[in-house]
């Protein structure tokens, strides 16, 4: 279950967030959101691998 959510989350990041972040690399809020999402991804990865 967590592995499926991790896959969905990674697809959201690569399909939605990454293109926006690439279009606005100097935007403070985009950098903040990317950092937060990376943290969530890392946590889900740790849970999935347990």
Image (cartoon, rainbow, N blue to C red):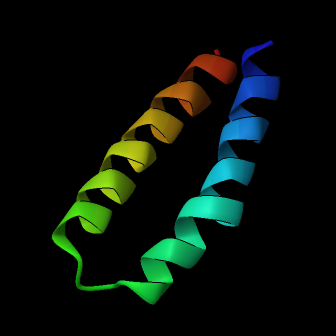
| Quarter of the figure that contains the N terminus | top right
Measured from the top left, where is residue 38 in percent x and y? 43, 49
**Residue at 58% over, 18% down:** 47
**Residue at 38% over, 58% down:** 34
Total number of numbered discs in the rendering: 0
**Residue at 23% over, 77% down:** 27
Compared across the picture, whether 17 is left or right of 30 comes to right
**Residue at 50% over, 74% down:** 20
Compared across the picture, whether 29 is left or right of 47 comes to left
Measured from the top left, where is residue 50 in percent x and y? 64, 14
Measured from the top left, where is residue 37 in percent x and y? 43, 45
On screen, 27 above or below 31? below
The front one of 9 and 19 is 19
Q: Residue furthest left?
A: 28
Compared across the picture, whether 49 is left or right of 28 comes to right
On screen, 27 above or below 14? below
On screen, 45 above or below 1? below
């Amino acid at each position: 279950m967590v592995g499926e959510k991790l896959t969905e989350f990674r697809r959201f990041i690569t399909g939605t967030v990454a293109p926006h972040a690439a279009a606005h690399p100097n935007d403070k809020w985009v950098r903040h959101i990317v950092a937060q999402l990376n943290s969530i991804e890392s946590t889900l990865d740790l849970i999935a691998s347990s």
